[in-house]
Image: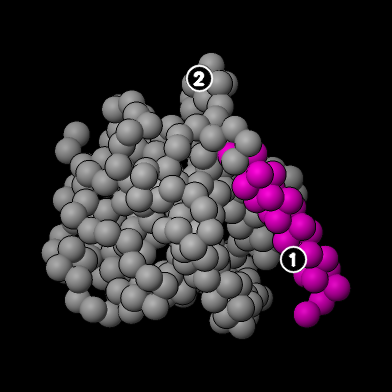
Amino acid sequence: MGEGLALLLSGKLAIVGLWFLAFFVGERLRPAALPPPSLAPGRGTPASRRLLRNGGLWVINSALSPLLILPLTIWASSQSLDWRPAWWSGWGGLLFDILLLDFLIYWWHRANHEIPFLWRFHEVHHRDQFLDATSALRFHLGELLLSGTARAAVIWLLGFPLASILVFESLVLMAAIFHHSNLRLSPAIERQLSRLFITPAIHWLHHHARRADTDSNYGTILAVWDSLFGSRNQNSKRLDMPIGVEGRRDLPLFKLLLLPFRGSRQGLHTRARFNR
């Protein structure tokens, strides 16, 4: 691994780590919503088991992703088609890369809800029955491998430089931590932010345990894509909304790892689309 790449990865880890810590602490000092009674905090309670479950998925991904996904990303970037025009470089090129990648990740996220095979893996993320910063780290390794493979194909075709990918990944992680967080924001601040960015109020609806709401609000960083492509949910966040997958409960870590391979009835049929 080159010195420049190691520096970029270290910077990404430090920035995202501090960002996560700030929200993890902040949402406990200033929570927007209290967890449901079934997830009341305390040692040995379902709430602590939930944190261990989310943390376990993160540990597995953190251990295996550098061995599987990072080499694939580096290879795709080094072997990518060299056709990018001169204007698609520098700071302007980086901003264009971020915009294009955010557009593409919108469609990938939407596909994870509309294609049954992809939903089998993405359902693990949605089984979480409460939202906080740890929810942003809760993904099945299979989903990361699928998204990493799709991303490698895009990198190869469009010639994204590795620096753009790492910057975008950092922004995606920071955005996910923010919009999954349970940090209480003033309505005025959240209203202004939601004009441009995905906020907790927007993403809360995406995790509502009602399929018509779950299949909406697919944006990751920018809120514009949902408005442009008819997936923006006009309902308002309510703190009493149940979180999770409609008709399903959360599972222990081992069962979550096996979930995509169990032929879940919910994952086998076509996902209902957002009823506009």
Magenta-highlighted residues: 1-27
| Number of the front mark, 1 or 2 | 2
Q: Residue furthest top?
A: 188
Q: Name the amino acid type tagged 1.
A: Leu
Quadrant for the C terminus in the image: top left
Image vertical order of residue 253 relative to residue 104, above or below: below
Q: Spatial distance from mark 1 to mark 2, Cα to Cα? A: 35 Å
Earlier-in-chain disc, 1 versus 2: 1
Tell me how many marks there are. Answer: 2
The picture places residue 264, in percent across and down from the top left corner, at 20, 71
Left or right: where 242 falls relative to 173: left
Is label 1 in contact with label 2 (beta carbons under 8 Å)? no
Q: Tell me the colour scheme of the image.
A: one colour
Is residue 16 within the magenta segment? yes
Question: For the residue carrying disc 1, how many other residues have a C-alpha within 10 Å: few (<14), some (14-19), or many (20+)?
Answer: some
Image vertical order of residue 47 relative to residue 141, above or below: above
Left or right: where 148 falls relative to 161: left
Image vertical order of residue 190 relative to residue 188, above or below: below
Check disc 2 and report its element: helix, strand or loop: helix
Say which of 111 and 202 sits in front: 202
The picture places residue 29, in percent across and down from the top left corner, at 63, 36
Say which of 78 and 62 sits in front: 62
Q: Mark 1 points at which residue?
A: 9
| Residue 2 visible in this rendered orientation of the protein | yes
Q: Name the amino acid type tagged 2.
A: Pro
Residue at the location (53% across, 16% down)? 188
Tell me, for residue 187, which label it has, or none: 2
Check disc 1 and report its element: helix, strand or loop: helix
Image vertical order of residue 25 relative to residue 137, above or below: above
Left or right: where 276 falls relative to 56: left
SS assignment for the magenta stretch, majority: helix
Residue at the location (41% across, 50% down)? 39
